[in-house]
Amino acid sequence: MRAGGTVVGVKVPFSVDDETDRHSVDVFARGGAPEIEASGRLDGVPDAIESFAGGVGAYAGGDRQTAIRRWREALAEDPANYLIRKQIWAVQHPERFYPEIDWDWQMQVLAQEREAEASGTSRT
């Protein structure tokens, strides 16, 4: 997040055991803007950033359905964004992420979604 609460990235996975993650939380708690790894950024598509942030807020407020709808809106604006896809998948299929990430499943789903998008039958 940037100062003022704008979501610019999400660290997944996040761990309190990771010193870098703890440092980022400390920086943010003191009003700063922690550095976000490039792979976790939401850059260049303002509507996608706004929709993604709206989804994060809805999810934090307990509204899972609205969160997923907003994240799908973000994905429609920025279909190449893997971070947005993973957020949707993690909420819809937590068993594929916890306690271990099922990378093979993710690659299969990614291929299916991209094929559906190319043929115009996508859910986004």
Image (spheres, grey):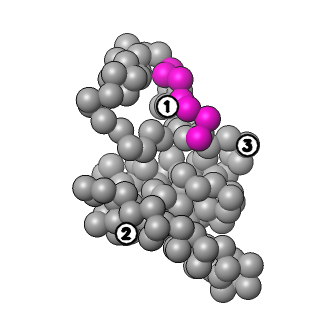
Residue displayed at 37% across by 27% down: 21
Residue displayed at 45% across by 57% down: 87
Q: Earlier in the sequence, mark 2 or mark 1?
A: 1
**Placement of 19 over or under 109, stated as above or below:** above
Task: Please state which amino acid type lies under the numbered disc 3.
Answer: Gly
Q: Earlier in the sequence, mark 1 or mark 3?
A: 1
Residues in magenta, as a range? 33-39
Q: Residue 17: where, in percent of width, then height?
A: 26, 29
* Residue indicated by mark 2: 92
Distance in Å between CA atoms under marks 3 and 2: 26 Å
* Residue indicated by mark 3: 44
Q: Residue 103: where, in percent of width, then height?
A: 45, 62
Q: Is residue 40 left or right of residue 119?
A: left
**Placement of 36 over or under 47, stated as above or below:** above
Nearest the viewer among 50 and 92 is: 92
Residue displayed at 59% across by 41% down: 39
* Residue indicated by mark 1: 1
